[in-house]
């Protein structure tokens, strides 16, 4: 007698095979198979990578500069650049000022009273800007500077510490171009002078300020490692270029011209210091009075000395070079080669939103959830797969853009603003991370809204539109700043490589590379949006029918 056995499969067993089993690893494999099986999604990710790389390399290929020096033959690219000074930390710096100095050997201090700080700048509204031809008008740049300084030498980029009065930022102490500490507030005048003092003890420089020369307050103490036994000490004056920035619908217009500052010093003394010789005037970096050539600045003093009173006039700046209209050089930052990340972001959020909504449109979501009842695991698997694909896509495109774009820009005369290795790594990996988190945000929106058009629209409006509204000045600057703080667009701050130094005027604009939040704070905002969207998607997936 033959006995027939009938095998009863549990419901969903075959579907489990289709989805790779109910283990989370199986879910990940199944979602990866779904993604690569849809040609349109693969093409979309490929297009995102191509857009990122193409825009970065294309922008680099069209960044060449040209010049013609003193009637000579036309030049282009690197041949047009002057010598670029670098500070002790390797950063590109501006180091131009008029310096009245003597050598100081060993320890000691210098004290001076500043009774006046005045300035002139190019008349940007009453006629053409012509240096030294009478088109200067009275006016003081906010970061015009006059004070006392201890400097390693008179060559550009050498280490220094200085305490100074400024146009509208009170007393400051600065060192080695990037560090800045605030002292007494208020502007200087004959009725309200400022006393300044610098004291050297080995490599330690301490700055003080006073309103009366009797009661002193320490501004800061800095360490200038490797400072030689003999340094240069004295008084200086300088002023960055005068710039007018006008925001208009669709963009920003910059208009700039030269500026100079004049400081008046008296009660100059050097107790305990081996000074008392002849004061020498040096236009460091050609930073003499506006209108002088470099040769004239070296031959004609930018200072006067009469009855113990010094009048010093200079131009330029002592500060790090940053992107923007005030830069002395045609600068480029690492993130400028990644300008295409914005277009890649659009393509990726579209694909990511459809990665979930396509299952609702085709009715496959029932099959997926029947095979894997753990709906949270399904959502997590989709988020991980699309996030990983977006990250790899962005990383490949970032590496290509930087590896090809940055050298091309440098060869064509752009000055790369150097950053640390960690900052450079963040600049390359950061955009890929933004694309990955934005993709997770979009896939969560797809789970919440179930409709491709609705999910894509919300993703674009929240992630892409705020950048355009702020960057193109379509909304007031204050509104734009809050959009860049509160919306997922804040995550793009992860690309910013050059900090907003307090002693350098910078324009808050994503187009210029500056965001209101720090890089990691901005990225955290994007992560919070993605987490919130995932949480809402999980709740709705568990409550709603497929």
Image (cartoon, grey):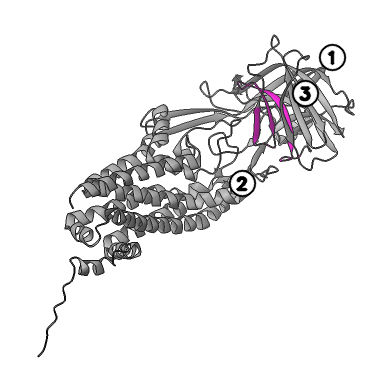
Task: Name the foreground residue: 432 vs 309.
Answer: 432
Q: Residues within 10 Å of mark 1 (few under 14, many from 20)?
A: few
- In terms of sequence position, does the residue under pointer 1 or pointer 2 come before the other? 2
The x, y position of residue 338, in whole percent, is 46, 50
Q: Which residue is rendered at x = 34% and y = 61% of the image?
A: 24
Which residue is tagged 2?
Answer: 80
Q: Which residue is rendered at x = 35% and y = 51% of the image?
A: 439
**Spatial separation of the CA atoms under disc 3 and disc 1:** 21 Å
Q: Is residue 140 above or below residue 12?
A: above
**Mark closer to the observer (2, 3):** 3
Q: Is residue 457 above or below residue 96?
A: below
Q: Are marks 2 and 3 in contact (CB under 8 Å)?
A: no
Element under label 3?
strand
- Residue that protrudes farthest toward the bottom in the picture: 1
Residue 197: mark: 3
- In terms of sequence position, does the residue under pointer 3 or pointer 1 come before the other? 3
* Stretch of the chain drawn in magenta: 155-181
Which residue is tagged 1?
Answer: 307
- In terms of sequence position, does the residue under pointer 2 or pointer 3 come before the other? 2
**Spatial separation of the CA atoms under disc 1 and disc 2:** 45 Å
Residue 201: mark: none
**Mark closer to the observer (1, 2):** 1
The x, y position of residue 532, in whole percent, is 34, 42
Q: Is residue 206 above or below residue 363?
A: above
Q: Which residue is rendered at x = 41% and y = 36% of the image?
A: 484
In the rendered image, residue 67 lying in the magenta stretch gets the answer no
């Amino acid at each position: 007698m033959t006995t027939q056995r009938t095998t009863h499969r549990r419901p969903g067993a075959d579907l489990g095979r289709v989805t790779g089993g109910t283990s989370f690893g199986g879910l990940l494999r199944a979602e990866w198979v779904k993604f690569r099986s849809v040609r349109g999604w693969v093409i979309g990710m490929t297009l995102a990578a191509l857009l990122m790389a193409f825009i970065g390399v294309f922008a680099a290929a069209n960044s060449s500069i040209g010049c013609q020096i003193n009637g000579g033959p036309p030049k282009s690219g690197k041949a047009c650049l002057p010598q670029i000074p670098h500070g002790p930390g390797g950063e590109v710096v501006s180091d131009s000022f008029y310096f009245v100095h003597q050598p100081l050997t060993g320890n000691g201090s210098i004290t001076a009273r500043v009774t006046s700080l005045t300035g002139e700048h190019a008349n940007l509204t009453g006629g053409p800007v012509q240096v030294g031809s009478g088109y200067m008008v009275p006016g003081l740049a906010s970061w015009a500077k006059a004070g006392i300084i201890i400097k390693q030498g008179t060559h550009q980029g050498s280490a220094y510490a200085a305490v100074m009065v400024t146009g509208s930022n009170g007393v400051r102490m600065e060192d080695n171009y990037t560090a800045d500490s605030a002292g007494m507030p208020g502007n200087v005048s004959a009725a309200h002078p400022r006393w300044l003092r610098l004291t050297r003890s080995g490599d330690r420089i301490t700055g003080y300020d006073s309103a009366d020369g009797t009661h002193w307050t320490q501004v800061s103490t800095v360490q200038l490692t490797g400072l030689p036994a003999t340094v240069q000490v004295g008084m200086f004056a300088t002023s960055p270029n005068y710039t007018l920035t006008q925001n208009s619908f669709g963009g920003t217009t910059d208009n700039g011209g030269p500026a100079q500052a004049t400081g008046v010093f008296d009660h100059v003394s050097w107790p305990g210091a081996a000074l008392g010789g002849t004061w020498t005037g040096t236009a460091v970096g050609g930073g003499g009075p506006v209108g002088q050539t470099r040769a004239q600045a070296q031959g004609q003093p930018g200072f006067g000395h009469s009855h113990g009173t010094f009048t010093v006039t200079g131009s330029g700046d002592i500060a790090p070079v940053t992107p923007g209209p005030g830069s002395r050089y045609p600068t480029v930052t690492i993130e400028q080669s990644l300008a295409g990340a914005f277009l890649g972001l659009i393509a990726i959020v579209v694909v990511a939103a459809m990665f979930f909504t396509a299952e609702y449109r085709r009715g496959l979501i029932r099959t997926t959830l029947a095979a894997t009842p753990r709906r949270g695991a399904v959502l997590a698997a989709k988020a991980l797969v699309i996030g990983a694909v977006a990250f790899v896509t962005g990383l490949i495109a970032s590496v290509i853009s930087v590896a090809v774009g940055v050298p091309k820009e440098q060869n064509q005369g752009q000055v790369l603003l150097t950053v640390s290795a960690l900052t450079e790594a963040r600049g390359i990996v950061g955009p890929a991370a933004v694309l990955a988190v934005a993709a997770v945000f979009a896939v969560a929106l797809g789970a919440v809204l179930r409709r491709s058009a609705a999910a894509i629209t919300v993703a674009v409006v929240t992630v892409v539109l705020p950048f355009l509204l702020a960057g193109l000045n379509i909304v007031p600057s204050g509104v734009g700043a809050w959009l860049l703080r509160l919306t997922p667009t804040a995550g793009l701050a992860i690309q910013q490589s050059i900090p907003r130094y307090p002693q350098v005027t910078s324009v808050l604009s994503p187009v210029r590379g500056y965001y209101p939040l720090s890089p990691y704070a901005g990225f955290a905002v994007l992560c919070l949006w993605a987490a919130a969207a995932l949480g809402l998607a999980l709740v709705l997936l568990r409550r709603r029918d497929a």
